[in-house]
Image: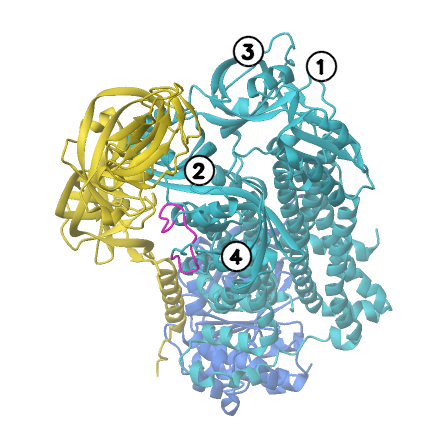
Chain colours: A blue, B yellow, C cyan
Amino acid sequence: MAKKAGSTKSLTVETTPAFRASGLTKVYGEGRTAVHALRGVDMEIPKGEIVVLLGPSGSGKSTLLNILGGLDRPTEGTAHFADTCLTDMDDAALTLYRRNHVGFVFQFYNLMPSLTAEENVELVTEIARNPMDAGEALSLVGLGERRNHFPAQLSGGEQQRVAIARAVAKQPEVLFCDEPTGALDSTTGRAVLRVLRDVNDRLGTTILIITHAAATAAMADRVIRFADGGILEVTVNKTRVDPEELAW
Amino acid sequence: MAQKRRRSRNFLTLVAIALIAAAMAYSFWPKPALVDLGAVGRGPLMVTIDEEGQTRVRDITLVSAPTTGALELIALRSGDAIDKGQRIGGISSAVPGMLEEVIVAPADGQVLQIYQAGGAMVVAGSPILEIGDIQSDLEVVVDLLSSDVVAIEAGAPVLLGGWGGGTTLEGVVARIDPVATTRISALGVQEQRVDVTIDFTGPSEERQGLGHGFRLEARIVQWSEDAALLAPASALFRENGVWSVFRVAEGIARLTPVEVGHSDGIHTEILSGLGEGDVVVLYPSSSLVDGGAVAERAAE
Amino acid sequence: MSPLDKKLWRDLRRVKGQAAAIGLVIALGVMMQVMMSGLVHSLQETRAEYYERYRLADIFAPVLRAPNSVAAQLAAIEGVSRVETRVTGMVLINIPSRDLPVMGRALSLPPGGEPGLNAIYMSTGRMFDAAHPEEIVLLDSFAEANGLIAGDNLKATINGAQREYRIVGTARSPEYLYTTAPGELVPDDARFGVIWMNRDAMSAAYDMVGAFGEALFSINRDACEASVLEEIDRVLKPFGGGGAYGLADQYSNRFVSEEMSGLEVSASGVPPFFLAVAAFLLYIVVSRMVQAEREEIGLMKAFGYRNREVGWHYMKMVLVIAVGGAIAGCLIGIGAGRAMINLYTVYFKFPFLVFVLDPKAFVTGVSVSILSASIGGIFVMRRIFRMAPADAMRPPAPADYSAAGQVGAWFAKYLDQPSRMVLRRVTRQPGRMLGAVIGIAMGMALTLSMITIYAGFERTLDLTFTVVDRSDVTVGFARPVGEDAIFALRRIPGVEVVEPTRAVGAVLRNGRFSHQGAITGLTDAPELIRAIDSDYATIEMPENGIVLAKELADLLGITPGEMLAIEVMGGNQPVLEIPVVAIAQSLLGAPAYMGMEALNRALGEPGLASGAYLRIDKAHEQQIFAALRDMPMIAGVSLKSEMRTAFETMMNQGAGATRYIMGLVAFIITFGIVYNAARVAQAERARDLASLRVIGFHRGETAFVLLGELAVVTLLALPLGSLMGHFMSSAVAEGFSTELYQIPALFLPESHGYSALVVIAAALFSGWLVKRDLDRADITTALKTRE
């Protein structure tokens, strides 16, 4: 569903939310040294939205992302992706889930240094069910001519864009980004966010972005604020700001 | 455009495994055991009873003093030829006036032993010398175990060697004593032994230099066969009490029971179980197994 | 504790697996050093003490028969401090449980009981009573091996007459730690006995009243043994002597010395290798760790820690592992040494044990481990010193693979991404990969050498008892006998072939090299006992010449064509100059062969045999043994099967037994190296591997990236290890050979197969361990770490 910049989201109700969490709790350790990363969180994320998760460190946003992404399991509670219950799945099933449905982008890019940009993307397209062509994914992020370069030869921003191409090439329903602009300067950061916005526009991928920078929230459809392991408030933006216009 | 899925890692893994498996197969492929081989063939076989023997002159004539008196010095020496009627020496009586008594050789032959050289007084009847015909009257005497003697009879051929002349002489068993005597063997045990007399069958020219009382090795033929089927005796061994060999065909050694006949220690007669031209393992070691691969030891 | 020290302990805990593996390798090296040298020292001390306590003679001088008065002349020889004479003789002992009588030696003891030299140690029972001439004392190892105890009766044939004796006690003697039947080379407790008897009774039995058969000497510390020996020979020659020898040539002592020098070789040769390997591994582990912690190091430097303080911190880790391993090795070495000492004490039949720790070994072991570890540590420190703090703290740029990408580009087209990752990683740092390959290859080479030794031992057995000696039974005569005795042997039913031999003792001399041994005269065209050449073909005995075993020829430094001087100790004791005609292949003993006729002619005793080799029909075995048993002229009968078993037993115990320990150790080293390589690779790739898991790669697929690298390194190491092992085997085989037997270095494909299997098994096991760890790793934490 293409949307024009600055337009409001229509209030059509999607049939199934992309994600649903119910009573999600995560505790590390036990007794007096126990850390409560999440305390009984309930939330819903509709399909096709850009959602920004804000909050100080240790507030639980990364933990929630990890659980929704199938990287971690909650101590209590359930999480659903569409109609599937994530918390019931075993390791192999979670791996498949990540393989076929989820793309990840991290603060430090996590590219394979021994593969070229194109090969890094092919890493994913080789195992995906319904992948995009690797070259196409790179073009999508504006790096079509740099396909044969190794990460050592790319700048930070370019590496992050390759990471996004890699995440997107498998045509996942969801894209998780944990501090995607944390290691980049503001101009490059905005460019990267632009790419994310493009992906959402063109492919309709649900995008979850964790960030420190509160200004980023302006580009989201929904903003969820975290504190102390729980959700402080959920704000729905009537309008989305273009990433290029963000200022932090 | 769907990406062609590549699974080279599976392929590479398989290749690596295949390489290793091949290398292992090569290293562990059973190598044939190295053995010495011999062949089964036809040939003569003799089973002999071997014993040391001595020559002796059959008829030894003892010349004694006919009377008491002074015997003149005898010019003869041991080994001298002597003819019948030849003068040996004279004895002059102590009684004055009596004529000298002359002693003559009673037979042809050689002087074997001189007991009394002369130049001294002799008593009537005392031995002076022995005469025997080495050339034509020489025989061999051997003493055999009484149990061995039962297996031979007069007329059995004999091979005589080790007499110093380098050749092997022929003889026959002439007589076997009916009585055994107790003797101590060279190894110190008591045995019952029987004397066996052997005649030379060849001309005396063959055995020039052979004298009386000389040692030789007699091999009395107990049994012989001209064209027996023979296997090298070192190939035979007892397997659970049964004589067997390892027969080799196409590089595989097969445990083969055989029936054996006579043996001379070097070759053994095969009555059944092997055929002419069969190849057998010599001195098989205890590690050889039936059906194992074998190869001939490198022999340059 | 300072924070850095706390960090040290936590880091050590983190790499506990690798640290343990390296520490183990060090411990093993030090353990071997301590254990072996402790063993050698203890054995040497024990032996010296035992010899001294029981006054073992320095010189032995056998004669045929010399009147007692000659002893005074012997005592007057310069350098001699004490003389003791005794009556000796061969005896044939009937053991009820054995078919064949057993050879033995009878020795006299003075009627009082305590001899001046060569005293005995009573193990059970009591000394014999002079009033009872039928009482005897038996060698306790022989008694034990044959189930005899004090109080039993013993039937023995002495000088042709069979008598019955009563065993009143069993004893040990330093003279007979090892006993071997005359003519045989391998000790066997059961088949050679020693009897001590009252001298008066013995003189009567052996017709030696007023005479002696052997003189024993102890010499002054500063005396020259060679000149004393010469003098003794001169005095005793008229009495059939002339063959005096020193303790070094006494069979039992020589054997013990051989075993001990074998242990010494192990002690000095093996540990350095271990320690070198350990140093190498330690270097790799710590250098990788330093690389991983560049940020922390940069931080410390930024805070003002001096270079050497930071370097010392990492050095401490190296030292902790090295010293920890060394101490563990020392402790284990002491424990193992004690255990082995007990084994060896029983093996050598020492009646007591002097356990001596060699402090030098501890010092050497610990200091060499520290030294070798430190060398590795110094290289690491250099890298630390060179790090600039700011650079260190910056997140590292991704490693540059652009150069590596070109390598094998044509090949890479056909590979999937994980395979390409493996390929590029291997080619990017060829130096590092080569180091791992060489390390693994060395482990394999060591394993291969040990396996080759096992095959070599089998070959020695096979050659000696299936190729050279093809008889069933060997017979020795009480005195040299003539042909009639050979004929008599042939007449025994069941005896198929009899091959007589004539053996004499002789001193072989080539210039300044000499060797005291025996010459064996063989018949023409021998079948049962042969001299064989390197192609396993029979060497014809020359008309006039001698054939030497290769070992002997090397010892004498002589080659075919040259003349050898021989001083024969028998017959009319001629001194001969004989050309060496050929070299024979032999792995047991160092035999010399001549034609029997030629030897007898030289001795002036034509036609005599001292022994014979027999091939028999097994079905008649019992009757043949019964017949042989009753023959007084037969002094001894040996079954080849028993000789073979004795040899095998000897090779499996004693110094030969260390081959099993060393084989195990080789496997441990190999495993240690492979495991370390895997762990180090895992640590470096942790983040990349976690990323793959995030992307959605299954555990197995992820493991491929890591294990693929390990597999490539292992596969490359296999052929290299084969090659290195090929050369190492020769050296190791040489080390295991003794004067008594030689172990050939064989080159068999299956040895290579086994050693490759060891490496592959180690790689598979290490891979499994690493994968297990990978599977359990928490993905999220791995992602967050930056290197």
| Mark with earlier residue (3, 1) | 1
Amino acid type shown at disc 1: Gly
Calculate the distance from the C-alpha at mark 3 to the C-alpha at mark 4: 49 Å
Calculate the distance from the C-alpha at mark 3 to the C-alpha at mark 2: 35 Å
Q: Please tell me whether residue C525 belongs to the stretch shown in magenta.
A: yes
User: How dense is the environment of label 4, judged by Cα within 10 Å: few (below 14), some, or many (20 and up)?
Assistant: many
Q: Please tell me whether residue A168 belongs to the stretch shown in magenta.
A: no
Calculate the distance from the C-alpha at mark 1 to the C-alpha at mark 2: 38 Å
Q: Position of residue C343 (x, y in %)?
A: 61, 34
Q: Is residue C457 above or below residue C234?
A: below
Considering the numbered disc 1 on the image, is that residue within a helix, a strand or a loop? loop
In contact (CB < 8 Å): disc 1 and disc 2: no
Considering the numbered disc 3 on the image, is that residue within a helix, a strand or a loop? loop
Same chain under badges 3 and 4? The reply is: yes
User: How dense is the environment of label 1, judged by Cα within 10 Å: few (below 14), some, or many (20 and up)?
Assistant: few
Q: Which residue is mark 4?
A: C550
- Magenta highlight range: C524-537
Q: Nearer the viewer, residue C752 or C574?
A: C574
Q: Position of residue B61 (x, y in %)?
A: 27, 29
Q: Which residue is mark 1?
A: C112
Between circles 1 and 2, the one closer to the viewer is: 2
Amino acid type shown at disc 4: Lys
Same chain under badges 1 and 2? The reply is: yes
Between circles 3 and 2, the one closer to the viewer is: 2
* Label 2 chain ID: C
Q: Is residue C576 above or below residue A216?
A: above
Q: Is residue C526 above or below residue A196?
A: above
Same chain under badges 3 and 2? The reply is: yes
User: How dense is the environment of label 3, judged by Cα within 10 Å: few (below 14), some, or many (20 and up)?
Assistant: few
Amino acid type shown at disc 3: Gly
